Amino acid sequence: MIEFKLPSLGADMDYGTLLEWRIKPGDRVRRGQVVAVVDTAKAAVDVEAWQDGEVFQLLLEPGGKVPVGTVIALLLEEGESAQNAIRRPMATATATSDVEERPKVSPAARRRAMELGIDPEAVRGSGPHGVVTLEDVERASVSGATTDRADAMRQAIALSMTRSKREIPHYYLSETIPLAGALSWLQALNAGLPPEQRLLPAALLLKAVALALREYPEFNGCWKNGRFEPVSGIHLGVAISLRQGGLVAPILRDVADKPLAGVMADLTDLVMRARSGSLRSSELGEAGLTVTSLGDQSADAVFGVIYPPQVALVGFGRIAERPWVENGNLCVRPTVTACLAADHRANDGHSGARLLGEVDRLLQDPERL
């Protein structure tokens, strides 16, 4: 028997509310299939199955709020029979009375509410049995609904970042990287591509960080149980600001192994879905390192806060033309400031400086990316 538990969809998640089941008893499910939609403090997330099986029993009703790790469904493994399986009692939802009073919200309405930055449960529903519909949310956006969702997200971010600054002994390094060669190379590459396939500098920066982690794996992992634990693969968290405020940091997987076009396509897709509230559970697991960029906000540098339990974060500021000394001559070159925030329990400044140096070297040779 497979116990399907409510997964952790981020280090700052303790509870989740089941919004919708996408399966029913008797269904066959495959690994990676979306089986439920779960609401966290930050977003409604499509939860995927991590194993093949046949649905035997659903243990939580939509609207139920339970702690991470609660068994919410049972699946039969290959060769097991429903006739011999034993049913279990339903999961006990937290604050049941409050949950029962929560209005039902259609998935489309919830996603649109996320885009608009309003709390869908504060909207008066006009659908069958009071369900909040897409039209209700659109009307509420005009009239001005409350923003409890934004408040909940701020609280989640506050808890996570407070934990980070309290528990992680940060150190910071920065390096200014010239980008004239990389941007010229990118311009020439894009000239031969249709607009929808052109690459942004962000793809180069992400790929350079991922390749540098191959040389310095002590920055690709998490601090758990009093020691550094490396992660398998090179998966980068990407900080994405949301239109209604706040941010999420879903995962770009296997960045080091993908061509730049693949990194760009995956990044575009991830940003779009994060801002429309349709992330998947597999995209909210643990990355080895998070990259954040405020380049489009005119900030010269980003000295970020590490997302626990990770041990490092790389921030990129604005790409701009700045004074630069080259071969003893003062000139003007496009540059970017790369900043490393790292956990002194897991690594030190010497290796941190070499990591940034490797990012620099890779960006001077964009054909290697």
Image: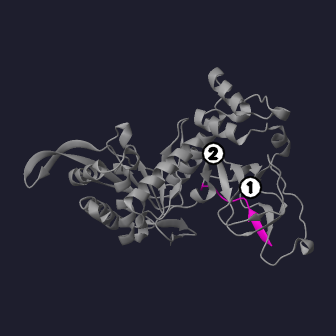
Judged left or right of residue 250, residue 50 is right
Residue density around tag 2, few if under 14, some if 14–19, many if 20 or more, within 10 Å: many
In depth, the one of 48 and 240 nearer the eye is 48
Asked which secondary structure carries label 2, the reply is loop
Q: Is disc 1 in contact with disc 2, using a CB cutoff of under 8 Å?
A: no
Residue 11 position (above or below residue 323):
below
Percent coordinates x, y for residue 124 in the rendering: 76, 28
**Residue 2 in magenta stretch:** yes
**Residue 244 in magenta stretch:** no
The alpha-carbon separation of the residues under discs 1 and 2 comes to 16 Å
Residue 233 position (above or below residue 340):
below
Percent coordinates x, y for residue 152 in the rendering: 64, 40
Residue that extends furthest to the bottom in the rendered view of this protein: 79
Span of residues in magenta: 1-11
Residue that extends furthest to the top in the rendered view of this protein: 143
Residue type at mark 1?
A: Pro
Residue that extends furthest to the left in the rendered view of this protein: 328
On the question of residue 28 being in view, the answer is yes
Q: Which residue is mark 2?
A: 43
Asked which secondary structure carries label 1, the reply is strand
Q: Quadrant of the C terminus?
A: bottom left
On the question of residue 172 being in view, the answer is no
**Mark whose residue sits in front, 1 or 2:** 2
Percent coordinates x, y for residue 366 in the rendering: 27, 60
Q: Which residue is mark 1?
A: 67
Residue at image location 50% in from the left, 50% down from the top: 269
Residue at image location 39% in from the left, 43% down from the top: 294
Question: Which comes sooner in the sequence, label 1 or label 2?
Answer: 2
Judged left or right of residue 266, residue 171 is left
Residue type at mark 2?
A: Ala
